[in-house]
């Protein structure tokens, strides 16, 4: 089959905010302990952080990193994680039925962020705690000195304020599994009170209120409307969370997961704008898509449960999904969806970063390696610069069980007026046929191909593992041709492609 695409740099959606390429580190499984922090590892630095992991996180190109949860944050007492290490308490982590040693806390994590060149985004606990504790953490983090809590930070070794700009008002408060889960009405009131108080302390912060844990929650839509009607003037973002997986061998629907993400984003935008209209507000609330990924949640629920009153392991192997080529194609397509909505999705966090549903895996004492999903993230983060462009796409369709008739191809492009570079990101969802794509690039002027990358494999379930860590990697796409204002490229079945022009 053949598809046609027109790219015109005049038709812009909005600037691609760097914060869209954010990550997420939760105290969960082997993410922090035995993931980023392993003092006995041969590459560990003086602070106990693995240098091989630092290098991979830098290569991944992650902007903001959300911390410390996730479900974990709803039982977290931040004070436990600061001060002399030997005095820090061990606590039960009810979210993941584990023991939290607090060996790595706010100071250590901030120093790790300096190593990986990322910005800190903090979540406050609105599950088992409230406004006062959120204010305390904000004072500890953002006040330069001269108060009890800022002084405590200085005594704990950090002279300068952390200067945290992005704050999440709790986590997934719509989810019955969440500690302190409450109704939209109750959460909306608490989030509004807390947001107002936090802004009284530091008006420069940006606040994210919890949206739905998924577009398939029974309260989806109404949750957003009620929560925003309480908090609209107090917050900058509403969050979206979404995880996708192949179910019952239905690869066709799975490959179209980004259709669901598109609809999710557009529905939340419509709901936020509805509240804006009702309130007659001047401001616009954006989306922080602060958890997204492929996650084989159904497998996790059945297999990985830890139970028992005397069984609270430290850093157990949890949620260690091993990603295939097909997973990476879907993952790359989810990134296309985020960039396509650059006007309203101005922050996002890939959940998560190391070992736990992660693009980077590690073995204790052993190597660190890239999962298949690493590649679409690192390449998109590096090449998607400037403005996202509105494209005209004419592609054949196929029928899916979950989403009806969907296009075989999905695409987005970005254009950077400063460098004159254009990047285009593509997927072919066909399971058996290569697709020829003809792209009209006449309005872009005289261009050549700077780089091209295609992720595909004869075995769509091929994976990178400890035994074979480099089994899957993208290759340059040698089919790309430019001739008389037209670019032609062949997209293999089940593939993700990025092309940079300049
Ligand atoms: O990312 C894993 C978990 O997924 C997070 O802790 C939670 O917020 C979501 O349900």
Image: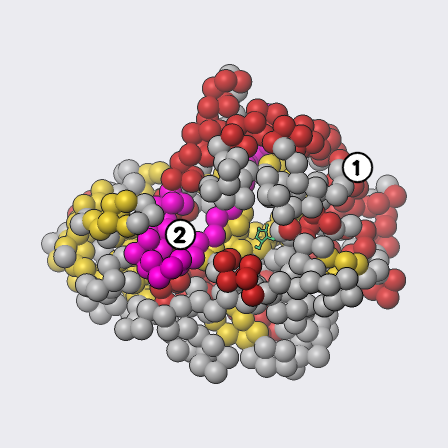
Number of numbered discs on residues: 2
- The quarter of the picture where residue 247 lies is bottom left
- Which residue, given by chain and number where applicable, does mark 1 sit on? 132
Q: Which residue is mark 2?
A: 334
* Relative to 183, residue 342 above or below: below
Residue at horizontal 56%, vertical 27%?
226
Q: Quadrant of the N terminus?
A: bottom left
Residue 307 figure quarter = bottom right
In which quadrant of the rendered view does residue 482 lie? Answer: bottom left
Foreground pick, 24 / 390: 24
Q: Secondary structure at mark 2?
A: helix
Q: Which residues are magenta?
A: 233-262
450 within the magenta span: no
- Residue at 21 percent of width and 64 percent of height: 432
Which residue is painted at 63% across and 47% down in the image? 177
Q: Point out residue 208 in the picture as x, y percentages from the top left corner.
A: 59, 38
């Amino acid at each position: 089959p053949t598809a046609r695409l027109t790219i015109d740099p005049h038709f812009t959606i909005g600037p691609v905010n760097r914060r869209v390429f954010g990550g997420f580190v939760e105290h969960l499984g082997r993410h922090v302990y035995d993931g980023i922090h392993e003092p006995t590892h041969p590459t560990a630095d003086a602070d106990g952080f693995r240098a091989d992991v630092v290098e991979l996180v830098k290569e991944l190109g992650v902007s903001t990193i959300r911390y410390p949860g996730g479900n974990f944050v709803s039982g977290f007492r931040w004070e436990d994680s600061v001060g002399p290490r030997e005095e820090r308490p061990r606590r039960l982590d009810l979210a993941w039925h584990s023991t939290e040693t607090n060996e790595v806390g706010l100071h250590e994590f901030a120093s790790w962020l300096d190593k990986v060149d990322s910005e800190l985004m903090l979540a406050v606990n609105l599950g088992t705690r409230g406004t006062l504790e959120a204010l305390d953490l904000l004072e500890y983090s953002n006040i330069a000195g001269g108060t009890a809590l800022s002084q405590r930070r200085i005594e704990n070794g950090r002279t300068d304020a952390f200067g945290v700009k992005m704050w999440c008002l709790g986590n997934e408060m719509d989810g019955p599994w969440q500690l302190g889960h409450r109704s939209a009405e109750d959460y909306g009131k608490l989030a509004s009170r807390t947001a107002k108080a936090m802004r009284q302390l530091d008006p420069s912060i940006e606040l994210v209120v919890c949206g739905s844990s998924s577009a398939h929650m029974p309260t989806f839509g109404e949750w957003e409307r009620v929560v925003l009607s309480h908090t609209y003037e107090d917050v900058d973002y509403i969050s979206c969370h979404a995880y996708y997986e192949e179910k019952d061998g239905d690869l066709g629907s799975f490959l179209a997961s980004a259709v669901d993400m598109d609809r999710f984003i557009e529905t939340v935008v419509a709901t936020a704008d509805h509240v804006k209209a009702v309130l007659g507000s001047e401001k616009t609330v954006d989306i922080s898509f602060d958890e997204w990924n492929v996650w084989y949640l159904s497998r996790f629920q059945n297999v990985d449960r830890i139970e028992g009153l005397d069984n609270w392991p430290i850093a157990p192997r949890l949620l260690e999904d091993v990603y295939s080529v097909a997973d990476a194609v879907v993952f790359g397509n989810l990134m296309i969806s985020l960039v396509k909505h650059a006007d309203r999705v101005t922050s996002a966090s890939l959940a998560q970063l190391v070992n736990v549903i992660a693009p980077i895996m590690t073995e204790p004492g052993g190597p660190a390696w890239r999962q298949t999903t690493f590649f679409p993230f690192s390449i998109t983060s590096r090449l998607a610069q400037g403005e996202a462009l509105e494209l005209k796409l004419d592609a054949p369709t196929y029928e899916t069980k979950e989403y009806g008739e969907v296009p075989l191809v999905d695409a987005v492009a970005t254009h950077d007026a400063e460098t004159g570079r254009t990047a285009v990101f593509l997927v072919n969802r066909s399971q058996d046929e290569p697709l020829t794509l003809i792209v009209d690039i006449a309005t872009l002027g005289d261009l050549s191909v700077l780089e091209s990358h295609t992720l595909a494999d004869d075995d769509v379930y091929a994976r990178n593992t400890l035994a074979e860590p480099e089994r899957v990697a993208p290759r340059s796409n040698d089919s790309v041709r430019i001739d008389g204002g037209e670019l032609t490229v062949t997209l293999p079945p089940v593939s993700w492609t990025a092309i940079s022009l300049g």
